[in-house]
């Protein structure tokens, strides 16, 4: 995962002679903090600031480096108003970090500095403790990751291709609201662009991907409207979308598919699976979070989850069922899951574990991807709106091993069986979408901090 940019600025004391008497404490504490932050971030940590002029110079440097995460560090007493320029070098919340050593007056400085900044409306996160303490490190790293996600979202670009699909109203958003909340740059394209580009794709690229799928997949089971011709159109669709993303500089997208493309060109399940995937026939590639059915909030949630761990994709699934006795979800959707989910650490195993099968809808023809998601701890989440106000629903779970033979419905879809001890009554009453998204790993704390920073209510359904 790429490390976030972090600026850590130590406040000096306008009484330099008094500061000099305790400079050894600053060195002791700063050395510990610097060592830890260097493992978590790309760190900018200049010499302590003692004047407003020095603070302005450093604030300008923070802006020029586009650093979103700013730490005002008070290992001993520091002059509070020196923090003003530093704090406003970013539009994001600022951290004020100190320690509890009785010989430092760090707590005094932390309260004075944070209180002063909050008086003027600056959002402040206060973190205090020993830099070598695991609890302190966990708190700090969680906050940094959450702020990094917020920063990345604000610097990203989204494209909706098509519009609302098959009447699912929870998928369409107000782009003006997105700009207000997240400063997101948004674009809209018509699905005809996919068809036009697809038909112009170089045949060599199509044959490369077709040969790769035929060689790497466990099976390709043609039948009904799933033919080599419709597979050809599916591959062309994927390459067209891949090129659209590159040309437009898009970080994440949503694609309508049904019914124009699914009935008149090709179902888009393969394209969406490969966009979300970290590899294709042309080699390793960036993950492009892509939600089907034009699901904008779904795509944004997928992008957030991907930002939690850029080494892996996120996914879109339907919430098919929940077994209250077993405390187990069944998640499945025809195309929103990357092949990598079959085996995250092995391209060959992931591909050989998957196959393509004839789709059950789509008059234009094409196949679905089919496999069972690998075991592992996951974080599931979904952004949704209540009366126009954003909320997030989330829980921790674990993907359980199941065989293909255990499937009783929607056999042709990728599946994940999620063991999740949740408050199901609360989930049913509050969840604002039929779509859910997950990523491997435990990122509940990061999502909670993200929501806290963004002023979003979070429903954590996990029974602790």
Image (tube, rainbow, N blue to C red):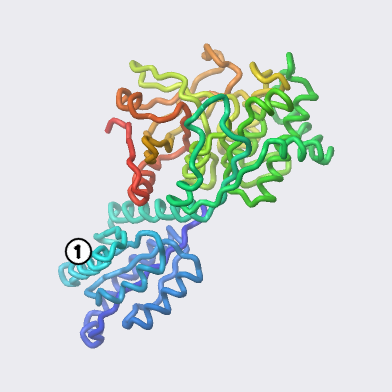
The image position of residue 145, as x and y in percent, is 41, 52
**Residue at 73% over, 14% down:** 224
- Label 1 element class: loop
Q: Nearer the viewer, residue 453 or 440?
A: 453
**Residue at 44% over, 66% down:** 43
51, above or below 355, in the image: below
> Can you name the residue that lies furthest to the top here?
408
Answer whether residue 252 is visible to the viewer in this image. yes
Going by the image, does 356 lie left or right of 72?
Answer: right
Residue beneath disc 1: 100
The image quadrant of residue 371 is top right
The image position of residue 266, as x and y in percent, is 72, 27
Answer whether residue 379 is visible to the viewer in this image. no
The image quadrant of residue 115 is bottom left
Q: Nearer the viewer, residue 200 or 346?
A: 200
Going by the image, does 350 lie left or right of 397?
Answer: right
Q: Nearer the viewer, residue 99 or 382?
A: 382
The image position of residue 310, as x and y in percent, is 52, 47
The image position of residue 141, as x and y in percent, is 37, 54
> Can you name the residue that lies furthest to the left here?
102
Going by the image, does 357 lie left or right of 392?
Answer: right
> Can you name the residue that lies furthest to the right here?
203
413, above or below 239, in the image: above
**Residue at 52% over, 11% down:** 408
Q: Residues within 10 Å of mark 1 (few under 14, many from 20)?
A: some
- The quarter of the rendered structure image containing the C terminus is top left
């Amino acid at each position: 995962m790429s490390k976030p940019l972090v600026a850590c600025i130590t406040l000096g004391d306008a009484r330099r002679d008094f500061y000099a008497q305790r400079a050894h404490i600053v060195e002791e504490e700063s050395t510990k903090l610097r060592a830890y932050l260097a493992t978590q971030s790309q760190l900018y940590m200049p010499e302590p600031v003692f004047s407003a002029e020095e603070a302005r110079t450093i604030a300008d440097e923070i802006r020029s480096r586009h650093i979103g995460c700013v730490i005002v560090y008070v290992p001993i007493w520091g002059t509070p108003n020196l923090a003003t320029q530093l704090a406003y070098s970013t539009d994001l919340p600022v951290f004020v970090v100190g320690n509890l050593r009785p010989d430092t007056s760090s707590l005094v400085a932390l309260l004075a500095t944070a209180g002063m900044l909050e008086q003027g409306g600056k959002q402040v996160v206060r973190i205090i403790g020993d830099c070598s303490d695991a609890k302190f490190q966990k708190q700090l790293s969680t906050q940094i990751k959450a702020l990094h996600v917020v920063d990345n979202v604000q610097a990203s670009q989204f494209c909706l291709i098509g519009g609302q699909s098959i009447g699912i109203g929870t998928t369409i958003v107000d782009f003006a609201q997105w700009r207000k909340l997240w400063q997101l740059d948004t674009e809209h394209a018509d699905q005809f662009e996919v068809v036009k580009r697809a038909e112009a794709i170089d045949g060599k690229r199509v044959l490369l991907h077709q040969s790769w799928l035929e060689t790497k997949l466990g099976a390709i089971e043609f039948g009904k409207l799933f033919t080599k011709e419709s597979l050809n159109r599916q591959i062309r669709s994927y390459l067209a979308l891949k090129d659209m993303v590159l040309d437009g500089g898009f970080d994440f997208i949503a694609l309508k598919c049904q019914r124009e493309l699914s009935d008149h060109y090709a179902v888009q399940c393969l394209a969406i699976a490969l966009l979300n995937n970290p590899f294709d026939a042309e080699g390793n590639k960036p993950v492009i979070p892509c939600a089907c059915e034009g699901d904008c909030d779904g795509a944004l949630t997928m992008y957030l989850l991907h930002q939690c761990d850029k080494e892996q994709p996120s996914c879109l699934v339907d919430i098919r069922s929940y077994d209250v006795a077993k405390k187990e979800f069944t998640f499945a959707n025809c195309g929103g899951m990357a092949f990598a989910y079959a085996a995250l650490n092995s391209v060959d195993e992931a591909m050989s574990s998957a196959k393509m099968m004839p789709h059950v809808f789509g008059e234009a023809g094409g196949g679905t991807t089919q496999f069972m998601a690998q075991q592992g701890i996951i974080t599931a989440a979904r952004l949704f709106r209540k009366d126009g106000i954003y909320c997030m629903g989330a829980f921790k779970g674990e993907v359980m091993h199941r065989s293909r033979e255990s499937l009783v419905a929607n056999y042709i879809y990728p599946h994940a069986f999620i063991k999740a001890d949740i408050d199901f009554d609360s989930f049913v009453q509050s969840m604002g979408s039929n779509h859910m998204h997950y990523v491997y790993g435990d990122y509940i704390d990061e999502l909670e901090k993200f929501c806290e920073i963004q002023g979003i209510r979070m429903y954590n359904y996990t029974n602790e």
